[in-house]
């Protein structure tokens, strides 16, 4: 079969569960697609180029991400708002770096209502421009500052090569936008929100991250500085999991967002923006999943426990289902939310009484990443026990365990919390093992030969030219200049590529 026909056939099948999962070591990109298909998370929207359909199980994960982040934003004083999907083309062109950075990705609306528009609209690629316009109408005095808003929305960036959740033409995200009276206050906001993202990634996603500053070549178009969190995926590649931007006064000047200072003068506001997207779902998949399918940390799992009743006749069925309902009712009162959380997170339980063999059910729920499976039959009822199997063997449970029902209910929160912690520990161990200090170009080429990648801490001479040549020759990019405590301490050395003096090591890797 020709390569193009094979790719088309794979895309046709990607939404239909029931196939095999390619081992990670055999074909990592195909494994990723297979996990998404078998967990029924999403499928390509072939009728709309580069877009995807997020299925209920996938969207439920996004909802939990969204709910947790939304609570954290509100706890730091931000309010949700919503701005138009369509942005006047003249707005995009007002900030020179911004339009240059986004021009290749813009989708433009030129006709509507059967007529050509006087001014074309851009389908929102990001909202700095249109929000800048409204900030200029809302802000008059220092008393109106700081202004802290967040928007949950969809955006469109025309992508040539797409991959579900990681890079699609349309995706879901949040974008925070703030205005301040001083640069120092704006810079503090940038770091505060980067910390929110970093803590969220580690505490909720069980995904350790490196926090750092992007190089000038990689910073957001129109920003003074971009900070980021970078995560290591199982294949050694990096995933930029969130960004927080210091916009300086660039958009303030472009849209005349001025305020009366406390001293009575006039000045432009200092702005920030920050965002994460549905690519976090891709990050969860590639951080934790295995060759059997999706693995979810409990704090992101839409379903925490599945109970599979086992019986031979109607009488046994009635008894087993009654016991399963009793267990579900008890588990439904268990709250997994951490102390002082702004929301409750009660355990979600599914009783799978479909007319299928138990083995088929085990197989399906394993692929969907449910953390805990409970098998319950007449023999278990007679002994007052349940058979428990965790999705992945860890200190939270290995293999099948037979546990008294009361004990299982009493310890389920502790078990799920331990499972969450264990997934983070495994990912942290991987990050340590796959992080290397590299000093020579030959060693660098060996580490990144073919499709190989790792987290490499290398000296860099600080020039755009060297950065571009490294990327051109190896597809490796500088992921970030680490913040204090998130990488090697600054020390003089020689650039791994040019041999020129270098002030410190930076993080390099191939990336999604």
Image (cartoon, helix red, strand yellow):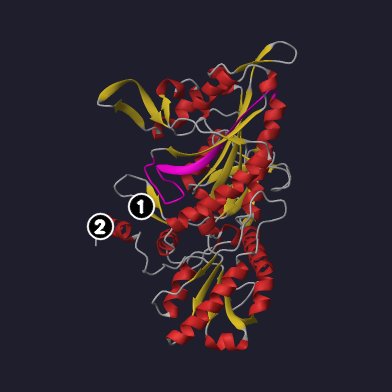
Q: Quadrant of residue 247?
A: top right
Q: Is residue 345 above or below residue 317?
A: above
- Which residue is denoted by mark 1 in the rendering? 44
Between 306 and 189, the one nearer to me in the picture? 306
Magenta includes 166?
yes
Does residue 260 appear left or right of residue 33 in this picture?
A: right
Of callouts 1 and 2, which one flags the residue occurring earlier in the amino acid sequence? 2
- Label of residue 5 in the image: 2
Q: Residues within 10 Å of mark 1 (few under 14, many from 20)?
A: many
- Image quadrant holding the N terminus, namely bottom left
Q: Is residue 281 visible?
A: yes
Q: Residues within 10 Å of mark 2 (few under 14, many from 20)?
A: few
Magenta includes 350?
no
Image spot of residue 6 (x, y percent): 28, 59
Q: Name the residue located 55 percent from the left edge and 60 percent from the top edge.
A: 301
Mark 1 falls on what kind of element?
A: strand
Q: Name the residue located 51 percent from the left edge and 58 percent from the top edge.
A: 285
Q: Nearer the viewer, mark 1 or mark 2?
A: 1
Q: Is residue 511 visible?
A: no
- Label of residue 245 in the image: none
Image spot of residue 405 (x, y percent): 63, 79
Magenta stretch in the rendered image = 159-182
Q: Is residue 268 above or below residue 198?
A: above
Mark 2 falls on what kind of element?
A: helix
Q: Name the residue located 35 percent from the left edge and 52 percent from the top edge.
A: 44
Q: Is residue 296 above or below residue 259?
A: below
| Label 1 to label 2: alpha-carbon separation | 16 Å
Looking at the rendered structure, the number of numbered marks drawn on it comes to 2
């Amino acid at each position: 079969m020709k390569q193009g026909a094979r790719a088309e056939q794979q895309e046709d099948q990607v939404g239909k569960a029931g196939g095999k999962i390619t081992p990670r070591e055999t074909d990592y990109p195909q494994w990723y697609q297979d996990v998404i298909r078998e967990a029924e998370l999403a499928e390509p929207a072939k009728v709309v180029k580069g877009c995807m359909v997020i299925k209920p199980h996938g969207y439920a994960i996004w909802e939990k991400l969204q709910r947790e982040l939304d609570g954290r934003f509100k706890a730091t004083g931000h309010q949700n708002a919503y701005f138009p999907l369509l942005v006047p083309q003249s707005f995009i062109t007002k900030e020179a770096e911004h339009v240059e950075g986004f021009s290749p990705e813009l989708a433009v609306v030129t006709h509507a209502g059967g007529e050509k528009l006087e001014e074309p609209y851009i389908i929102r690629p990001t909202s700095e421009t249109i929000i800048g316009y409204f900030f200029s109408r809302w802000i008059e005095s220092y008393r109106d500052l700081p202004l802290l808003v967040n928007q949950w929305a969809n955006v469109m960036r025309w992508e040539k090569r797409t991959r579900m959740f990681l890079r699609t033409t349309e995706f879901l995200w949040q974008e925070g936008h703030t205005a301040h009276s001083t640069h120092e206050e704006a810079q503090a906001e940038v770091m505060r929100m980067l910390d929110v993202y970093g803590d969220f990634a580690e505490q909720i996603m069980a995904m350790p991250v490196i926090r750092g500053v992007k190089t000038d070549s990689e910073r957001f178009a129109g920003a003074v500085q971009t900070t980021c969190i970078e995560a290591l995926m199982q294949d050694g590649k990096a995933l930029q999991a969130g960004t927080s931007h210091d916009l300086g006064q660039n958009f303030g000047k472009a849209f005349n967002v001025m305020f009366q200072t406390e001293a009575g003068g006039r000045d432009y506001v200092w702005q920030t923006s920050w965002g994460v997207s549905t690519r976090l779902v891709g990050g969860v998949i590639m951080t934790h999943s295995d060759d059997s399918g999706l693995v979810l940390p409990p704090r992101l799992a839409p379903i925490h426990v599945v109970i599979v009743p086992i019986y031979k006749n109607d009488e046994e069925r009635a008894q087993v289902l009654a016991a399963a309902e009793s267990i579900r009712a008890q588990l439904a009162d268990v709250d997994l939310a951490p102390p002082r959380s702004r929301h409750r997170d009660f355990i979600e339980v599914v009783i799978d009484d479909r007319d299928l063999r138990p083995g088929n059910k085990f197989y399906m729920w394993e692929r969907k990443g449910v953390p805990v499976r409970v098998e319950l039959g007449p023999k278990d009822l007679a002994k007052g026990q349940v058979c428990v199997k965790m999705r992945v063997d860890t200190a939270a449970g290995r293999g099948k365990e037979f546990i008294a029902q009361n004990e299982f209910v009493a310890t389920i929160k502790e078990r799920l919390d331990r499972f969450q912690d264990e997934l983070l520990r495994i990912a942290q161990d991987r990050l340590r093992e796959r992080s290397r200090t590299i000093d020579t170009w030959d060693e660098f080429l060996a580490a990144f030969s073919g499709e190989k990648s790792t987290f490499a801490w290398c000296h860099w001479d600080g020039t755009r030219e060297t950065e571009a040549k490294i990327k051109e020759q190896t597809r490796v990019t500088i992921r970030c200049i680490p913040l204090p405590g998130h990488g090697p301490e600054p020390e003089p050395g020689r650039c791994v590529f040019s041999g020129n003096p270098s002030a410190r090591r930076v993080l390099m890797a191939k990336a999604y």
